[in-house]
Image (tube, rainbow, N blue to C red):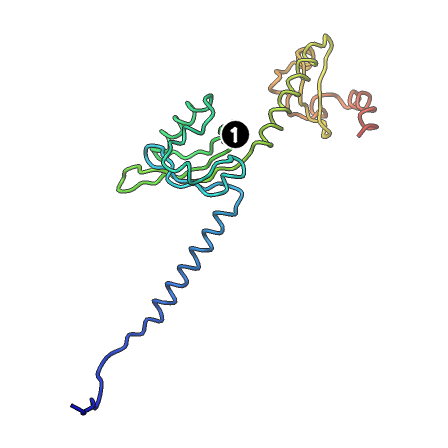
Amino acid sequence: GDEKPAAVEGFAIDVTDQVEAGEALKESEEQYRNLVENISEAVFSIDSQGCITYMSPSIRRFGEFDPDRVIGRNFLEFIHPDDRTEIVNSFKDLSNGIENPLDYRIVSASGAFRWVQSSSRSRIENGIFVGASGIITDIHERRIAEDTLRESRATLESFVNALPDPGFLIDDERRMLVVNTALCLILGRDKNEVIGRRAFDLFPAEVMARSFYHFDRCF
């Protein structure tokens, strides 16, 4: 009963590679999570029915949503009513592998609308559309600025078009921005042929020298 074993048999497995691979994977996942959670764009995924399966925390910045509270809800719930038809058509295209960026308005948690742009990629498994993933970018300030500029230009066009004499607006490179009908009649050109052209290409040199004297003094 007091005898001690003379030897012990066993084996050992070197799991260094597996441990290192596991640590590398964990580190990679951590880096990916930090990236997704800190970029300005919101990362999302939806299933084939349009229900949200993932939304990154960045949506709080411009959508004011708690990302956990949108999971399982259909994305149309958060779309401005006037933009829903376009979104539905885009989703149908996406299910057929047609991928195009889209601008639309979301309705934030406070009820305010905000312009965003989404870029999505279809997820196809065994030839079947199972959903999509992508990013949502806040473009509200840019879109509002563009709309304001468009409205200002429309006002200027109305003013120039109302002039009985030839009239036009040019930029600092002397490219035609707005021209009226009277000018087009003199030039014998359609408006589409004149817009974007440089004044030097449309008027004789002596006319340019006389007419743009004050322009040169300003610019």
Answer with left or right where residue 87 lies relative to residue 111. Answer: left
Q: Residue at x 52, y 46 (%)?
A: 39
Callout count: 1
Question: Which quadrant, please, contains the C terminus?
Answer: top right
Q: Position of residue 101 (x, y in %)?
A: 47, 34
At numbered mark 1, what does the secondary structure look like: helix, strand or loop? loop
150 relative to 18, above or below: above
Residue under label 1: 110
Q: Nearer the viewer, residue 96 or 108?
A: 108
Name the amino acid type tagged 1: Ser
Q: Nearer the viewer, residue 47 or 77?
A: 77
Q: Residues within 10 Å of mark 1 (few under 14, many from 20)?
A: few
Q: Residue at x 53, y 29 (%)?
A: 114
The quadrant in which residue 47 appears is top left
The quadrant in which residue 100 appears is top left
1 relative to 13, above or below: below
53 relative to 22, above or below: above
206 relative to 3, above or below: above
Q: Position of residue 103 (x, y in %)?
A: 50, 30
Q: Position of residue 168 (x, y in %)?
A: 71, 18
Q: Nearer the viewer, residue 102 or 32?
A: 32
